[in-house]
Image (cartoon, rainbow, N blue to C red):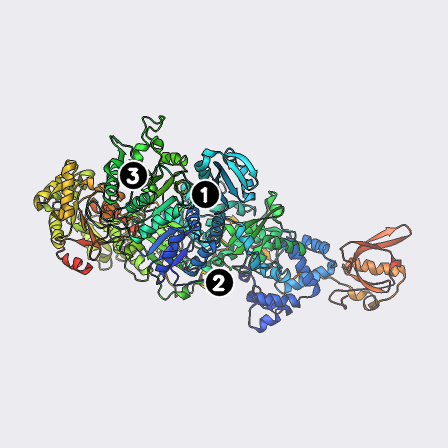
Amino acid sequence: MNVQQLVNKLSDKRMEQLLNASVWRSAKLRGMAWSEAAVDSRSIHEAAELLSPYASCFIKAMLRLFAAMPVDGERLLREVRMDTTLSGAECLMGLTELEEAGILFSVRKVWGESLYFIPTDSFAIWQQTLFACSAEPLSPSDRQGLLDGKLRKVYRPLGRQLLSAFAMLAKNGMELTVKGALHKKTVAKLLQAVDFDEQWLSRFELKWTLREHYPLKAAFILEAGFAFGLLYAEEGTLKWNEAVLGNWLNLKEEKRERQLLEWCLKLLLPAADVSAHIAAALIGMQAGQWYSVQHMEQWLINSQIRAPIAADLNSGAKMPDWYSLFHSFGWLELVDYEISGGTGTLFRWKPSSPLGALSHNTMLEVRRFIIVQPNGEVIAQPDSPFSIRWELELMAEQVSDEQVSIYRIDAATLARSLEFGRTRAAIQSFLEQAAGGDPLPAAFAALLEVWTSRACRTEFAEVVLLRCDNEQMAAFVKNDLSIAPLLMQQLGQTDFIVAKSQINEIRSCLQKAGYPPRKGVQTADSAAERRFPFVAWDERKDVRSAILSEWESCQQTAPFIYEAFPLHHFELNDRASKETYQAFPQWDSVPAMWTKQLRTYHPSTRRELIEQALEWQTPVQLRIESELRSFVPEKLEQQEGGWAVVGLLRDERERQPVRLTPDMWEEMRLVIPGQTEPI
Amino acid sequence: MYDHHDGPLIVQSDLTVLLDESRSSAGLAREKLALFTDAVKRAGSIHTYRISALSLWNAAAAGISANDIIEWLTVYGRYELPFQTEAAVRKLIGRYGRLQLTAQSGKLLFQGDASLMEELASLPSISGWIKDRLQPNEWELEADCRGSFKQELTRLGYPIIDLAGYHTGEALSVHVREITVSNRKFTLRDYQQDAVEMFYKEGTVQGGSGVVVLPCGAGKTIVGIAALARLSRATLILTSNATSVNQWREELLDKTSLKDSEVGMYCGTLKQVRPVTIATYNILTHRKSNTAPFSHMKLFSERDWGLIIYDEVHLLPAPVFRMTADIQATRRLGLTATLVREDGCAEDVYSLIGPKQYDMQWKTAEAGSHIAAVSCTEIRVPLHKEKEGLYRDAGARSKLRLAAENPGKIPVVQQLLQEHRGKPTLIIGQYLNQLHEVAETLKVPLLTGEVPQQERQQLYERFKSGAISVLIVSKVANFAVDLPDASVAIQLSGSFGSRQEEAQRIGRLLRPKEGNNEAWFYTIVTDQTKETEFALKRQLFMLEQGYHYERLNVPVIDFSEKEALAQ
């Protein structure tokens, strides 16, 4: 679940409460709402500084252990305790603080258990804040090694791949079979239209619907179409939401790639286990700079994050491989090179990737997005809007798609374009407009004329007959001022051709005139109309917010790939743990001195203090050999002739349980997290 | 991101380079591209070039480094140079010069980078040729494997510099005439001289084999003849067709001191093996059945050739490559207008004929007036009224023929002749009936396959001398390379869609012209018929070669304005 989805679920009051948490103090002063601060890098950095040691330690441990994966409350507390030296009460204190600040959330499962999670879009920022990646860009002197390496295949950016897939879908028909899936041929074409390698997606062990009909790759494409609100299913066919499609196509490329990255992260981070750390670190890197995978792995080891490393991936383990996935999506470049005893890999975000601040537009004084060549080749500049590329996908075949994209228009592609309702004049006008007003080269204009002169000169039109029962009725219809303009042509004495789309209007006019027509239409409506929407290029429109809200509104219904943890099905806990859990109900029932002062106690009192600490899951402060030590008791052991306590000495270098007998410390006191002075 | 808007080059990561001719520095960039790329297409303002291993090794052979290329691509590039392009250029160029063949005391030696040689030794396709590993960086090879060895290593991606030298071949006394037999002053143009010198390289082992690339009409035959004279050795010339054999012979007899008895033709029924022998690829690859041996391949060893010239080397068939692999000690010169081969044998040209020694781009040739600037015009004529009914009822094939033979074309031809009066003009057509009709109407001589050779020659001579300024020719003109030079060509009808045909016909006009160096090509097609579609198909190829067509619709009266403008 991301912040936007949480906003849809949280009350305004609750969001205000979240913002009032002390960690968002500066963000609030800057006028930010909680939903903004929760995904704002600066605010999160500030919040991390202001967290209490318990909360700070807790979230660090939680992210290290579970990354972006939602986790059951009991397991979370147990494993964080095992991973840290926090006492149980301190864990709860930390968790409560994080919940109160809207850094962590939980949902209630039907049987009362809670699943704790960090919003997917906050995860990466918290991750980068708490586990700053130490991998440095490659120095210029290392560049020779880079040039000696072997560059992996070049992929188109995901947006371009999806554009081809969507265009292919529009060209090949979107009717669904009785089982609700696209036809096999369409699915096959869909798969051909994209380059990315399915194996990198399959590593996430995603589940999806209609598995017997759709390979994961197809489900992923359709999921994207639905997630962004471009597609919807209705009456046995997929349909374009043309307004949303238009907005999506008119987005600037870097924005669209960024959205796609965010969408991928939302879909994949919760399914990625601890490898999500790699993704989070990756998106914090600088575009255009080369980094080493081996340096990344060293950082993971140093940070004690057990994410898969190259050795695991090479051993055939089916673990997520973010480098290969992002490479397959056309965002990363990867270079393999030989190092002693194996292969190393270097990577960089392409300047045109979601992380790059690429914009060619500023350099162009004329909006000349394409160049039409006399032989029918069309060269699309890097900044050609997708709306132009979309139309080119229909009227041309793509030859290559790199720095510039090359399309080729020929007789067959033009016939297809005509098939979808384009005319010669419309094609010419589109090309000339996209070419900055340049007229078509004479040779190509001649080709266009010839190629468009034969196909689609005739067509079968599905129109409707308005049939009258006699000539008088026909005369009435013809003379009615509201109906007459809707009649296309009279056939014989009693029939009129009318447009199918006008049926309802004519029906209503006839009803008003007192002649309600027979219900229904005599012939059944046949196959759904095929559409390849025409999208006008519109640079003035800032469509990001519109598309985002439309996209978000579609999130609940995206039907193809199931979320790894469908949190939105559960009820969000609207109160923090503190309010439901009284950690120290009788803390004032113990002698005040137990918590206030270090004292020497009789062994039996010492035992009482330890028992109390165990009950409250709090630490105790001990003076051992004149040094003050913080000790977290875990269990009491009865020994022959005495007792001992097993627990953790927090300042030990290694997290190793120790057994202490009461004679091993001189003085002690109970420490109540949040109530008494911490240790 | 780097975005140098004025940069004329767009470098793609698949090693394609697009040159935007509309940018001010396009000319400078084009000059550099010629050094390390092959031109693929020249349609419109964006021209396509390709970097390949071979184009890079050709560049390296000419002393160009990877840094030079990277710098040019960066300086003239519009966008950031793709990393993969830089890496590929460095890697491929880095392979050049690491391996070489030499000869010592009759031994064929392979020398180079020891670590690379170690790697190669393990390859079964290589190890069979190793006779003795004298040192880690020097092996003795089987004496007869020179060609096959180079071919295999080139295939594996490792070029070899062949310094094993040549045998001299049979001496032949020959020189280029200053005054031709036909009594014209003759000197080599500067670039032809340069091409010969680049090939010959003062007779050293560094030269003596390679390819010269010149655009159509720039005088490739002359370069071949000059190279022959420079070496003065018995020479075998291989070319693509019989008419070309004739043209070579005529040029040799006209421009060199060779006598008729010294020049043999080896094609059709003639099987003359003389100090200079001209043969076709066809005859060399002739055999009685698919399994029978090539009966004429022996020509390679019938004389002690000192030079073999491969004309139109981009058309060289595979069996000739195989034969060429065995004669690597003979000097070899390839001549072509393009190194781009569609059969994937470009590597074999490199390894067996040799690296590119000289290349002059079409634009450079045109700018230097080494070839004529041809204006192409398509004229659309309405179908003659009388034929409309016939056309409507005809089948697809007949429709094409009716459109091609449209009598409405004849007045247009008359008008064109009027406008270009006095200029040597060829009228070319596909259908004999139509040509006879035109000849009859215009009272102009007609040359077809039916005309005896002797009469043909006479017609050519009269045309050359200016006695007749218009000649109608049938399809024979497609390959009749002895066809005299013309300034105007009018195509009445052509094959359905043969790209080659139109190229050949335009090629006839390319030889430099006196005066303004202009030539005109007209193609007359019947509007609103299938013929316009086929005409466009033919033109598409020419468009990609950099020509552009103007389009006129009849009735168009004033052609004189067009010619006047050109002058």
Residue A357's disc number: 2
Q: Residue at x 21, y 42 (%)?
A: B482
Residue A16 placement (x, y as % from top left): 58, 68
> Marks 3 and 2: same chain?
no
Which disc is residue B185 wearing?
none
Q: Which residue is mark 3?
A: B240
Mark 1, Cα crowd under 10 Å, few <14 / some 14-19 / many 20+, is some
Quadrant containing the C terminus of chain A in the rendered view = bottom right
Q: What is the distance, in whole Å, between disc 1 and disc 2 at their CAs?
A: 52 Å
Return the chain for callout 3. B
Q: Is residue A301 left or right of residue B187?
A: right
Question: Is label 3 in contact with label 2 (beta carbons under 8 Å)?
Answer: no
Q: Looking at the picture, tell me which residue is in the foreground, A235 or B492.
A: B492
Q: Secondary structure at mark 2?
A: loop
Which residue matches tag 1? B163
How far apart are the alpha carbons under marks 3 and 2?
55 Å
Chain under callout 1? B
Drawn side of residue A130 relative to residue B63, left or right:
right
The three-letter amino acid code for the residue at tag 2 is: Ala
User: Decide: marks 1, 2 in contact (CB < 8 A)?
Assistant: no
Residue nearest the observer in this picture, A237 or B2:
B2
Direction from residue B61 to residue B383 in the image, left or right: left
